[in-house]
């Protein structure tokens, strides 16, 4: 957090009684069913990814190797989801008062950079194969591609039984849907080679699959970059929040010094100052603000300070960072 956030935490007036960080989890509670579904999907996808790489090398198919690359994005997405659930249960301590969930974001950043390198390698290989076409064994390629499609359908079904509203589950589902396209592309390439013997279809479709990887990698990079820069979550309208809360909450005059940022996926934090109307009940107003932030705007943890002077920066707001 920035120094400004620490100033907020240091003020004696802010309403945070009984809300110490050490031993307090900021992670949303997650059912064991979610974690189990993600772990099964992770093991299936990761295992078949290795099989697909072997199949791609043995058959000579770049499209299969590219699809294995896309399955790598699925595997990492599922791993990050599982890691988020596991770390969410790990208690905070005196040294890391917000716990360990930001490791998920750092892993996401490494993943995004790795995927860009993978796309670059696939593009280079595709150009080489256009210049010098290589023979691809359509039979083994078809078998591996069909198995990949079946594995993806199975993983999609398993994940669909979990909580699809959870940000990590939703992200993993989108990855698996994208990989279904990659498997279909590999099947099409195998069919074309088997029926016509036209080898360039393999590098052409490998480039198509690498574009799917590029799209996933770019989205992941932007999301992790925004979290690490302590930007407000996507779709979070700070100015609207500052207008709406005083209108909705009796006794609340204004909101100032509002900072909103994400600790990790699905964990939104906020620090803010509130100004009270004359004769307002400070405890009641603070409780209502906290409730509105949590249930109306998805803020898991808010540090609320009361501006007793009545002249603090109500007009001042920013995204954290």
Image (spheres, rainbow, N blue to C red):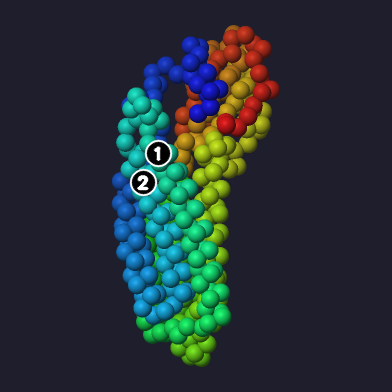
Q: Which mark is residue 251?
A: none
Residue at position x 35%, y 58% in the image: 41
Comparing 94 with 120, the one in front is: 120
Q: Is residue 222 visible?
A: yes
Residue at position x 55%, y 52% in the image: 219
Residue 200 point in image, percent of width and height: 54, 82
Please determine whether, in this image, residue 153 is positioned above or below residue 111.
below
**Label 1 Cα crowd, 10 Å radius (few <14 / some 14-19 / many 20+):** many
Q: Which residue is mark 2?
A: 83
Residue at position x 30%, y 46% in the image: 32
Residue 221 point in image, percent of width and height: 53, 50
Q: CA distance from mark 2 to mark 1?
A: 8 Å
Q: Which residue is mark 1?
A: 101
Q: Earlier in the sequence, mark 2 or mark 1?
A: 2
Circle 1 SS class: loop
Please determine whether, in this image, residue 22 is positioned above or below residue 299.
above
Comparing 313 with 124, the one in front is: 124
Q: Is residue 288 visible?
A: no
Residue 3 point in image, percent of width and height: 53, 23
């Amino acid at each position: 957090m920035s120094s400004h956030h620490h100033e907020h935490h240091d003020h004696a007036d802010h309403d945070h009684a009984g809300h110490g960080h050490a031993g307090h989890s900021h992670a949303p509670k997650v059912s064991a069913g979610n974690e189990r579904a993600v772990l099964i999907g992770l093991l299936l996808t990761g295992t078949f990814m290795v099989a697909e790489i072997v199949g791609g090398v043995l058959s000579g198919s770049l499209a299969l190797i590219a699809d294995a690359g896309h399955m790598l994005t699925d595997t990492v997405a599922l791993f990050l989801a599982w890691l988020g659930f596991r770390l969410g249960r790990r208690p905070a301590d005196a040294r890391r008062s917000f716990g360990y969930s930001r490791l998920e974001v750092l892993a996401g950043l490494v993943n995004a950079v790795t995927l860009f390198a993978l796309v670059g390698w696939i593009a280079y290989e595709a150009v080489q194969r256009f210049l010098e076409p290589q023979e691809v064994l359509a039979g083994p390629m078809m078998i591996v591609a069909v198995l990949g499609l079946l594995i993806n359908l199975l993983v999609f079904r398993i994940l669909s039984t979990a909580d699809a509203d959870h940000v990590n589950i939703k992200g993993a589902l989108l990855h698996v849907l994208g990989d279904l396209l990659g498997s279909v592309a590999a099947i099409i390439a195998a069919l074309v080679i088997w029926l016509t013997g036209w080898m360039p279809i393999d590098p052409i479709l490998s480039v198509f699959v690498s574009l799917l990887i590029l799209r996933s990698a770019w989205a992941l990079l932007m999301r992790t970059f925004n979290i690490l820069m302590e930007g407000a979550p996507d779709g979070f309208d700070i100015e609207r929040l500052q207008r709406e809360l005083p209108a909705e909450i009796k006794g609340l005059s204004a909101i100032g010094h509002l900072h909103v940022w994400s600790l990790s996926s699905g964990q939104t934090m906020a620090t803010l100052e509130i100004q009270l109307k004359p004769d307002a009940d400070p405890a009641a107003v603070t409780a209502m603000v906290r409730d509105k932030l949590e249930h109306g705007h998805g803020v898991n943890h808010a540090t609320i300070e009361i501006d007793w002077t009545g002249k603090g920066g109500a007009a001042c707001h920013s995204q954290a960072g």
